Image (cartoon, rainbow, N blue to C red):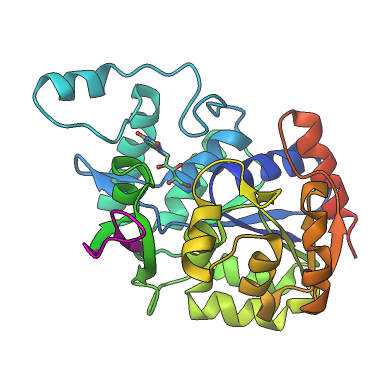
Amino acid sequence: VICVLAGGVGAAKLLRGFELLGLDEEVVAIVNTGDDDEFYGLHVSPDLDSVTYALAGLSNDELGWGVRDESYRAIEMLSRLGDDAWFTLGDRDLGTHLYRTRRLLEGAHLSEVTDEIRLAHGIGTSIVPMSDTPVRTMVRATTTRDSADEMTLRFQEYFVKHRHQPWVRSVGYEGAEGAHVPERAILALQQARLVVIAPSNPVLSIGPLLAIKEIRTTLIERRDAVVAVSPLIGDRALKGPADANLHALFHESTSATVASFYLDFCRQMLIDPADAPAANAIRALGVEVHTTPTIMQSDDDKITLARLLAAHQ
Ligand code: FO1
C-alpha cells in the first residue's frame, strides 16, 4: 500500500501520476475536508472533488479546480436573482454536489459517498476523506500585515471571497477534536510501505489532517515510511498562498520551514532543484533530502514523480 496525504491540486496531479503509472500496489489517498462548506444547501468538498476529477481525467486544468468542458448557467441565474454568488459552482460540478448532499441526507457517511462517486467514475485509487464528521478550517486574519481588524473567516471565505489576500494570524480546525477518521484511512497509514505527503499547502491543506490526533499519532509511529514532497519552488508556491501563509506564521517560507512543520513524522523530503539552497538546513533538522524536479505540468511529469516516489525505500 502507498498512502498519500492529500490537499487539492498538487495532490490531485501526483495521484493522477500514480494512477497512470499503473502500479500493482494499492494507492490510498487520505484527503483534506477542512475546505468543505455548504453552498445553497449543498455539501461541497473541493479537495475530494479535485482529486476525484483528476483521477477520472475530468479536471479543469485552466482553473485548477472543477470540471473541464464546464458551463455556468445555474450560477448565472443565481446572480440574476440577486445572489452575490461569489463561489462559482459549475453546472457539471453541481451534479456531484447534488448527489453527495442527497446521500448524506439519506444518512450515508462522507467516506461511503466518496467511494460511490469514485466507483462511478471507474477510478482505481482509493479516495478516503480524513473525517466522516465535519472539520472546518477557520482562518483568523487581518486585512493587512499591519492592521488590527482581526476577523474569523471560513476557509472558502478567506480563499475565494477575499482571494487569500488577508494576513493570516492563526488557523484553527473546528471539529478536529472528536473527528471520526474512517477506519480505512488509519489502516492504510498503518499498512503502507510508503506514506507520501503530497505537495499541498502545509498549513491550510495538510494542517487539517495533522490537527486530527489519530492521524498525527499514527504518522509519528510511521515516521520511517514518510516522504514529504515540498510544495515550494524557489521558496514560492506554484499556486495559492502557501508561501504567504508560512511567512505569516513562521516568519520564513523555504522548504526547510516546511520540513520543520513536518519534523515529528517526516524522515525524507523531496525538493525541487530551485530549492537546493535549503537542502543543508533541512539535513540539519535530521531530515534526508532528495532533489528532483517537482513541477507537474504534463502527464509525463506526474508519472515521473510518482515513479520516483514508488521506488523510494
Ligand atoms: N476557487 C476559486 O478561486 N473560485 C471559485 O469560485 C471556486 C469555486 C469552486 C467550486 C467547487 C470546487 O470544488 C472548488 C472551487 N474552488 C474555487 C477551488 C477551491 O476554493 C480551492 O481550490 C480549494 O478549496 C483549495 O484546495
Is residue 280 depicted above or below 35 in this figure? below
Q: Position of residue 90 (x, y in %)?
A: 35, 25
Which residue reaches farthest left? Answer: 82
Residues 125 and 265: in front is 265
Up-down: is 227 above or below 75? below
Give the x, y percent position of residue 71: 37, 16
Q: Residue at x 66, y 56 (%)?
A: 28
Residue closest to the eye, 218 or 85: 85
Query: Which residue is outermost to the front?
Result: 146
Residue 145 drawn at (x, y percent): 36, 59
Total number of numbered discs in the rendering: 0
Residue 224 lies in quadrant: bottom right
Specify the quadrant of the image occupied by residue 161: top left
Residue 104 in view: yes
> Is 240 on the left or on the right of 234, as rendered?
left
Which residue corresponds to the image point at 81% horizontal and 58% vertical from the top-left? 277
Q: Quadrant of residue 260?
A: bottom right
The segment highlighted magenta reads 137-150
As for residue 241 lying within the magenta part, the answer is no
Nearer the observer, 206 or 147: 147
Position of residue 227 in the picture relative to residue 136 (left or right): right
Name the quadrant of the N terminus.
bottom right
Residue occupying image coordinates x 49% and y 49%? 241
Q: Position of residue 244 (x, y in %)?
A: 50, 54
Residue at 69% x, 39% y is 16
Residue 188 in sight in this render: no
Is 134 on the left-hand or right-hand side of 12? left
Ligand 1's quadrant is top left
